[in-house]
Image (cartoon, rainbow, N blue to C red):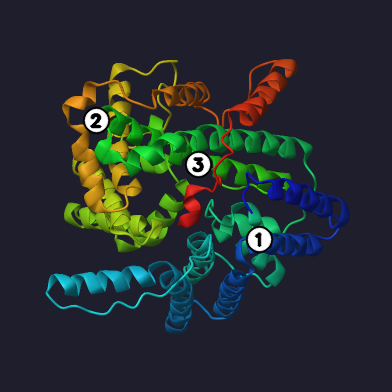
Amino acid sequence: MLFNSIEFFLFLPVAFCLYWFITNRNLRLQNALIVLASYVFYGAWDWRFLGLIIMSSLVDFTIGKRMGTLPPEAKSQRKRLLFLSLTVNLGILGFFKYCNFFIDSFVELFAKMGLALDPFTLQIVLPVGVSFYTFQTLSYTIDIYRNQLKPTNDAVAFFAFVSFFPQLVAGPIERAKSLLPQFQKARTFDFDKARDGARQILWGLFQKIVIADNLALAVNPIFTDYGQMPGSALVLGLVFFAFQIYCDFAGYSNIAIGTAKLFGFDLMTNFARPYFSRDIGEFWRRWHISLSTWFRDYVYIPLGGSRASKGRQFFNILVTFTVSGFWHGANWTFIAWGALHGLFYLPFIFLGRKKYGNVAAQNSFLPSIREAGAIAVTFALVVLAWAFFRAPTITDAVYYLAGIFDSSLVSLPPYKNFIPYIAVLVLIEWISRHQKYPLEKLPFTKPVRWGIYFALLAAIIVLGEFSQKGEFIYFQF
């Protein structure tokens, strides 16, 4: 069930009314309704995969409960329980997402050595959202193991935490210590929060339907026929894809966060104007924040983080980014994309650069020349790496980038009529860069604010791209 589908806009008001008018006096019933609604939402894709999320929830609830009965000094027993949780969750993720990748890579390796193997590839369908909810439930058992979280005895609340439908299939990847307590305390309807959620949903739909889906009409043919495209079109293709994937994923996150607010929940911000970043480090503090912080806390820091020698820090960064790339998909292109970002990050460790603690042009409308240059260089590096993320193979990515540096680079590009979409988005986001999302605090009178809301709604109806399926890019991860 897609956020931008008719089915969802029928499902949401029904779930909302049942939640606030039927079950609102009983916390356990509210949570049970969320579990039921979430399973209906998830089962709309393929009901057979409900067994996986139920099994993952049951395993980690049981392990967490058992771990909570053991004293901190019972390290070996606690470690075995954690290992069981890791094995089950990463086993599910590994089988469904990476089994064919390893089989094909193994066959290809032997073929290069002159040994022909008969490949056996399973017809495995990737369950939507498996990469997200496995990481979410793993945060629960890991934090209990670290004594940073006490296990819950409320199975209904825990199952609701794992399956919460707004962020179930594409995040944000919420930590148990942040989201789970919200299921364990009474919730009353907050009109201001619900209104704020509706605004954020509207902005997310605009990002997805008007910006991302329209840019896809240019990105897809450019990447499909890149060998026949002039260099100018290839540059536009990369820039368009950068904004397509941003608006597609940030749009989903905004709809998810806004929907959660309708039900009285607060989810973490997942995107914070990443293309206004002044270095790669800042970019990753603003892009897919829930994932980057997950890898920071559960991979980078356990490896030694920044408290090690420079050489060890380089290793930790490269491993973290490479694994992060592999999380995105079973393809060498994602590994290359992650490793490339790791390489981009290394100079900042060597130079000992300080983290930016504010937004660009904090106290002025326009950035300084230095800031503008830093933003441009960072954006160029990110766009360069997107070639490996979008291309079907590493070879295609290399040839795509090579095709840019041709005399046709200075020619008039096709698809230039899509540039205004990006210009409008950049202007809106720059003006509102101090806010969580552009509609959060509009400094206008009520009639003007409502005019803006209706203008965005009209843009979605008139300019929105509805001829394609409209699936979100990150559903494939």
Q: Are marks 2 and 3 in contact (CB under 8 Å)?
A: no
Asked whether 470 or 55 is in front, the reply is 470
Residue 414 drawn at (x, y percent): 35, 26
Secondary structure under the numbered disc 3 in the rendered image: helix
Q: Residue furthest front?
A: 228
Q: Which residue is mark 1?
A: 44
Tell me if mark 1 has few (under 14), some (14-19) or many (20+) residues whose alpha carbon lies within 10 angstroms of its own. few
Tag 3: residue type?
Asp
Residue 254 drawn at (x, y percent): 58, 41
Task: Give the mark, 1 or 3, whose residue is nearer the N terminus.
Answer: 1
* Residue 265 seen in the current view: yes
In the displayed structure, would residue 224 be above or below residue 324?
above
Depth check, mark 1 against mark 2: the one in front is 2
Residue at image point 43% right, 42% down: 287
Depth check, mark 1 against mark 3: the one in front is 1
Assign the C terminus to one quadrant of the image.
bottom left
Q: Residue furthest left?
A: 114
Tell me if mark 3 has few (under 14), some (14-19) or many (20+) residues whose alpha carbon lies within 10 angstroms of its own. many
Asked whether 95 or 152 is in front, the reply is 95
Is residue 332 toward the left or the right of residue 466 in the image? left
Assign the N terminus to one quadrant of the image.
bottom right
Instruction: Return the mark for residue 248.
Output: 3
Q: Which residue is mark 2?
A: 231
Residue at image point 28% right, 23% down: 373
Tag 1: residue type?
Ala
